[in-house]
Image (cartoon, rainbow, N blue to C red):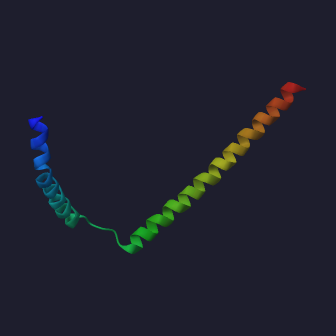
Amino acid sequence: MAGALESFKEWPKVTKDYIGELQNEMKRVTWPSSKQVQATTAVVILTVFAFAAFFQVVDSLIFQTITKFYDVMTK
């Protein structure tokens, strides 16, 4: 029980130290420019649409193949 009480008493100091370290680390971060964010966002969106189109084509081909195979096997 004493260990839990000591841990609880140290909580404000530990939290303050953590926030201080976090602030120091955030000052060292190199943030992307607005132009970089827009460019990479556009690339991600285009890539998502390209993969969606690709998987739609593959799904259609697989569906047609299975349907034709099923039709041949049921006749």
Q: Quadrant of the C terminus?
A: top right
Q: Residue at x 14, y 54 (%)?
A: 12
**Quadrant housing residue 74:** top right
- Side of 33 relative to 7 (left or right): right
User: Is 11 in front, or is 41?
Assistant: 11
Residue farthest right in this picture:
75
Vertical arrangement, residue 6 with respect to residue 69, above or below: below
Give x and y (percent) for residue 38.
45, 70
Give x and y (percent) for residue 37.
41, 68
- Side of 64 relative to 51 (left or right): right
**Quadrant housing residue 68:** top right
- Side of 3 relative to 72 (left or right): left
Vertical arrangement, residue 72 with respect to residue 57, above or below: above
Q: Quadrant of the N terminus?
A: top left
Q: Residue at x 49, y 63 (%)?
A: 43
User: Is 24 in front, or is 2?
Assistant: 2
Vertical arrangement, residue 45 with respect to residue 64, above or below: below
**How many numbered tags mark residues here?**
0
User: Is 57 in front, or is 22?
Assistant: 22
Q: Residue at x 18, y 59 (%)?
A: 19
Q: Residue at x 85, y 29 (%)?
A: 72
User: Is 53 in front, or is 11?
Assistant: 11
Give x and y (percent) for residue 24.
16, 63
Give x and y (percent) for residue 51.
58, 52
**Quadrant housing residue 63:** top right
